[in-house]
Image (cartoon, grey):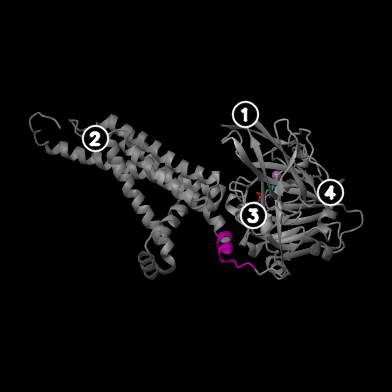
Amino acid sequence: MSAGPEPLPAPPGQRRAARVRGLAAAGAGIVAAAAGVLSGELAAGLLSPSLSPVSAVGSAVTDLAPPAAKDWAIQTFGTGDKAFLVTAIGVVLALVGAAAGLLELRRSGAGAAVAGAVGLAGLVAVATRSLGAPAAWTCALLAGAVAVALLRWLVGRLRREAGPPGQAPAGLPRRGFLQALTGTAAGVALGGVLTGVVRSASLAADAARAALRLPAPAQPAPPIPAAASVGVPGVSDLVTPNTGFYRIDTAFVVPSVDPGSWRLAVTGLVEQPVTITWADLLAQPLVERYVTLTCVSNEVGGDLVGNARWLGWPVRELLARARPRAGADMVLSRSVDGFTAGTPLEALTDPGRDALLAIGMNGEPLPPEHGFPVRLVVPGLYGYVSATKWVTELKVTTFAADQAYWSTRGWSEKGPIKTASRIDVPRRGSRVAAGEVVVAGVAWAQHRGISRVEVRVDDGAWQQARLGTGISRDTWYQWAAPVRLAAGRHRIAVRATDGDGQVQTSELAPPAPDGATGYEIIEVEAT
Ligand SMILES: Nc1nc2c(c(=O)[nH]1)N[C@H]1C(S)=C(S)[C@@H](COP(=O)(O)O)O[C@H]1N2
Ligand SMILES: [Mo]
């Protein structure tokens, strides 16, 4: 508080200038907020609809709202309750934006702090909506960062031109600020149109997916045996939740495929070319299988691996209808986005290996990122030679005649999964209490299964771990082993033996061209 004499009432011209300055700051705040929200939505629209920060905030609000408020919204707006919620979020954000603009005008940095806090709240909403994917965080972070940066830039300009409040004489915003503001607003409008276009393209597929009820499997997956779990906290879940499932593909924009117009054509070296529709596929007796997918790019100890319960139709049934010709040895599966994978024909026709045209993942329709509406899942083969998402064509051909996407880029044309084991606990580089320490993790050798896992401390002897029963030989297995650690630094190594009795190789190989090998060795410090 100033101890000086009361300030004289400002002259009318000054008061008007102060009002205009305030309006300009509020406008700048609204435009900055809109730009932030749009950036987040546009990024989500391009990457994947399920990453939308506004949707995350909307569902967070829905969850937190008292039931009475929810009932009221549904009664008042019916199926328009979502639109109402989005509008309400928009109004609140505009108000907060205006307030942040005014605050920023008063004190540089104050409004930006408010905008940052709102961005942070959005980030929390995204994080708690089980959209833990890094891409989801990125969309929310982008939204907050754009809003904060624009707010600082626009209001900073205004302060330089018109002076902060309380500083006489108040000037009017000048050309530079007005140009910056209208330019940004025009950018927001353009971004809005762009976002709308991107989103509406994925709307048909989204609506179809949301309305979809998966048929019950003719052959459900047998229940997971209790002994499959080793019961150690921190070890990878036997079944990876969809939201935590690794995602690898070449698609910058997640393809939006409307099942209503989806077709799968079996072409090439066949007696009878066949095309099936979504309805045809749903009418087949579907089976459910747990299969662990692995990426050839996975490093030793890496996390490009996950296990899910897939619902689908064995692809051998479809191939049987088409009747492959003698001499064919490969199926080139093609996705709507042009990606191709080359799979040995025998892996797809083998009655002992349930290669699926999958439509369900852990009881849900395939998430858009994981290939909605239909993808291939082939036990035992790395994803790049088998797991085509958004699949639309199976061309029966030969390895001599055709090359798949990654085979033309230096990766092997065949990609059987190599035996691998990973330590999940204790964490690499962590500190543990000296004495008995439980080491645990997962091991996989899809379609051969795992028969043994061993661990070794420093240069000690290999000791056998307790091995979970696994779900099937097509999935990963949990394992756990108590080891004694004296105080000090230690190396802990793990190795697995597959179902054929082959010990995992200790030879180090990088992922290219056909999968990494070597033992995972972690360092921990016992204290
Ligand atoms: N259409 C398409 N399908 C694809 C790919 C791709 O780039 N495009 N990548 C493959 C690779 S390399 C892997 S490891 C798996 C990963 O499947 P996920 O993203 O569902 O985990 O998808 C496979 N299917
Ligand atoms: Mo992959």
For residue 500, which numbered disc appears in the image? 4
Instruction: Using a 10 Å C-alpha cutoff, classify the residue at mark 1 as few (fewer than 14 neighbours), some (14 to 19) or many (20 or more).
Output: some
Some atom of ligand 1 lies within 8 Å of the CB belonging to the residue at label 3: no
Question: Mark 1 vs mark 3: which is more N-terminal?
Answer: 3
Q: Residue at x 47, y 49 (%)?
A: 126
Instruction: Using a 10 Å C-alpha cutoff, classify the residue at mark 4 as few (fewer than 14 neighbours), some (14 to 19) or many (20 or more).
Output: few
> Comparing marks 4 and 3, which lies closer to the viewer?
4
Question: Mark 1 vs mark 2: which is more N-terminal?
Answer: 2
Extreme residue in the right direction: 326
The amino acid marked with disc number 3 is Val
Identify the secondary structure beneath mark 2: loop
Disc 1: which residue: 489
The amino acid marked with disc number 1 is Arg
Identify the secondary structure beneath mark 3: loop
Q: Position of residue 15 (x, y in %)?
A: 16, 39
Q: Quadrant of the C terminus?
A: top right
For residue 239, which numbered disc appears in the image? 3
Real-space CA distance between mark 1 and mark 4, rounded to the nearest whole angstrom = 35 Å
> Comparing marks 1 and 4, which lies closer to the viewer?
1
Would you say residue 338 is visible in this rendering? no
The amino acid marked with disc number 4 is Asp
